[in-house]
Amino acid sequence: MATRKSAAKPNVSADELKKYYHDMLLIRRFEEKAGQLYGMGLIGGFCHLYIGQEAVVVGLEAAAEEGDKRVTSYRDHGHMLACGMDPNGVMAELTGREGGYSKGKGGSMHMFSKEKDFYGGHGIVGAQVPIGTGLAFADKYLGNDRVSFAYFGDGAANQGQVYESFNMAAVWKLPVIFVIENNQYAMGTAQKRSTSSAEIYKRGEPFGIPGQLVDGMDVLAVKEAGEKAVAHCRSGEGPYILEIKTYRYRGHSMSDPAKYRTREEVQNMREKHDPIEHIRQMLIDGKHASEDDLKSIDKTIKDIVNNSADFAKESPEPALEELWTDIYADEIPQHDA
Amino acid sequence: MPTEVLMPALSPTMEEGTLAKWMVKEGDTVSSGDILAEIETDKATMEFEAVDEGTIGKILIEEGTEGVKVNTPIAVLLEEGESADDIGEVSAAPAADSSDDSDEEEAPAPAKAHAAASVPAEVKSNASPDWPEGTEMKEQTVREALRDAMAEEMRADELVYVMGEEVAEYEGAYKVTQGLLDEFGSNRVVDTPITEHGFAGLAVGAAFGGLKPIVEFMTFNFAMQAMDQIINSAAKTLYMSGGQMGAPMVFRGPNGAAARVAAQHSQDYASWYAHIPGLKVVMPYSASDAKGLLKQAIRDPNPVIFLENEILYGRSFEVPVLDDFTIPFGKARIWREGSDVTIVSFGIGMQYALQAADKLAEDGISAEVIDLRTLRPIDYDTVIASVMKTNRCVTVEEGFPVGSIGNHLSATIMERAFDYLDAPVLNCTGKDVPMPYAANLEKLALVTTDEVIAAVKKVTYR
């Protein structure tokens, strides 16, 4: 049903397109399943779904290299799947089970993976921005050429610590990409009601940080912008800002009826700008994949997601002794600097 | 097999709801994302979307039904190739929720501090000498001792760096980082903008990324700007990550009242930080403790709050001349042995405690004076063992009275040594007022030696 025309991108291979399709669909199906498990009472508390925003993380992960770091807010399931974390571990954390990434002690908003350089999963709006800047500080200190992605939303863009971070990143030329996932609503507050200027990507200008506006419903556009930003950071030029315009189809969290926008607005995005449908159409139109090929990808993903749900239901709750562990570390965690 | 559509929980607290309106009818084809129904939760009316695609085979709960329990089947969805005849296979029982059967299980043993109130047979003091007898000593100020501790640890470990306002070129607002820039360079001694929230968060990120930051706050009054990063990011991440990553770092700087700087610049945060699991909290009095404990703090793999005192910076003490000495956390120091009363304090409170003990000795009262040195962990055993001997206790600190460290010690002593007490435990604290500017009022707001003496006389019934 995609009505948008996609310019042919000759430098993208069929395999890459298929990978993006796969990775975005995995996030979508995973989130739908998470929503379902929430409805069944298997997931508790706050649960913020990423449906609609999939092209942002999949596009940027395509621009990242091994050893690059990422940190985000509480709408974090998509980021974890996109950087290669195990869907079983993520889903089991959502259900608060022993097999979860944080042994059930973090939940939806607080998950981490040292192995995949995923530094959370932070529940306080904007707090991840100085942390991401600090990850970049560490890389610069250690003298490697890694890059950090600090993701935050249009809502967090009004937190003071974001500008404290811009300032320090610019003064010290830190290799951090500030990724503003602008889904246009800070919980229920539309951007125009909360934000003095519409162009958030220009807010780096007074600090001398280049910024770029990106179509976040087009994974190829995101990837291209990401590559430019990564090259800028890796070459020692300092921070970069990407404002990626996107849209979340679901409410802010599971308990948000989303009355602050019309059903038509959501339907319009879904039907005309869906990032997954966009790539699907490119694959079919360009004869890179047949309907059967895509069905087979769909099937693979359905299996992965169903397995993760089974795992998340079957994994036991954490042992009661776990209440008292991981409060203090005995040894300094090793790193491979 | 047909799929049951279950009544969803649409808020963290919803147990049942009203099926307000069906947006589909039997025979309709639906795909993922289509609105199936409107459901009223305890909070709002929500649209309920389809997850799976298929055809609505049967609607089980009519619209307008109130009090539909979460997980009750409300409709049946048919997949491709199935018909309404297949519906019989679906069980009518609501799906079981396996997660709520843990209520009756036995809770694990509570933390040590909350153990039963029985009187222990014997409590042994942890206090012991911090260095071998006969060690050469030299006079050093607290300021120099802190600087030496950082320099020694920075020489030993390249991952250790210092950041804060005026720490490099200015050599510290209180000159604690004197000489560090010259020796270690601007990569490791980093002047920050005035941006406490930002640089505290940045340092937490640097710690996640493998460094061991020492963050200097010009004073801890300004750390309130950074409180969210200290508590929510530094202290809690190890737990929230199931032990995968934490923040090995030190937040240090002067804490408590200085002189005539009034309410916003004169506050003791000891009990604030001591409240937080995941932090370690140190508050030294002497120069040797400042040095040995700061070296230990830099090596500790957890976030450590290191509370110094501006008035003590210039005070000189004997410091051992040793290549490398540290003082473990959770080990109090007995400054003076005594038999009639135990006076427990820490940080600058120790000067009132020690002065009081001197004067009390003139009146024939023998006070044992204990310096806690660390407030998380606290060396309870040394305090309890002393109270069992003296049967009386007075605590001394500069902070506000409500929720003070002294309050906590009183409760612990009551739990563990109730039968040994010959008098209530008294807490000497700062007064319950913001710090005034006027010299006479400021004096009145602070805890004094005379107040400590009066408290001791009260508990010894003199």
Image (spheres, coloured by chain):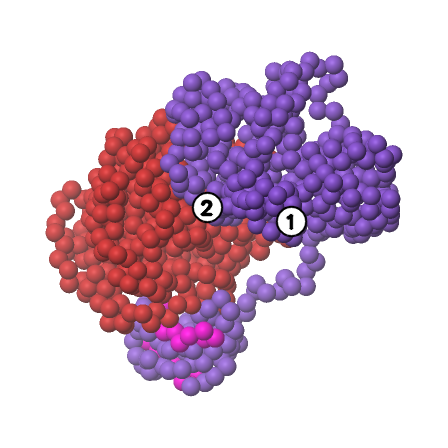
Chain colours: A red, B purple
Nearest to the eye among marks 2 and 1: give it: 1
Q: Quadrant of the N terminus of chain B?
A: bottom left
The residue lying toward the viewer, choosing from B319 and B351, is B351
User: Does the CB distance between marks 2 and 1 fall below 8 Å?
Assistant: no
Which mark, by number, is residue B431? 1
Give the residue drawn at x 37%, y 31%.
A139
Quadrant assignment, res A48? bottom left
Give the residue drawn at x 37%, y 71%.
A257
Q: Secondary structure at mark 1?
A: loop
The residue lying toward the viewer, choosing from A19 and A266, is A266
Regarding residue B189, the answer to whether it shows in the image is no
Residue bearing mark 2: B225
User: Is residue B60 inside the magenta stretch?
Assistant: yes
Q: For the residue marked with disc 2, what is the amino acid? A: Gln
Q: Quadrant of the C terminus of chain B?
A: top right
**Distance (Cα) linking label 2 and label 1:** 24 Å
Which mark, by number, is residue A215? none
Q: Is residue B178 rendered to the left or right of residue A48?
A: right
Which chain letter goes with mark 1? B
Q: Residue B59: give x, y in percent of width and height.
A: 40, 82
Q: Is residue B85 above or below residue A121?
A: below
User: Is residue B375 inside the magenta stretch?
Assistant: no
Tell me if mark 1 has few (under 14), some (14-19) or many (20+) residues whose alpha carbon lies within 10 angstroms of its own. Answer: some
The residue lying toward the viewer, choosing from A91 and A208, is A208
Q: Is residue A321 rendered to the left or right of residue A32?
A: right
Q: Are marks 2 and 1 on the same chain?
A: yes
Q: Secondary structure at mark 2?
A: helix
The residue lying toward the viewer, choosing from B62 and A122, is A122
Q: For the residue marked with disc 1, what is the amino acid? A: Lys
Q: Tell me which numbered mark, 2 or 1, is placed earlier along the sequence.
A: 2
Q: Which residues are magenta?
A: B41-63
Give the residue drawn at x 40%, y 21%.
B185
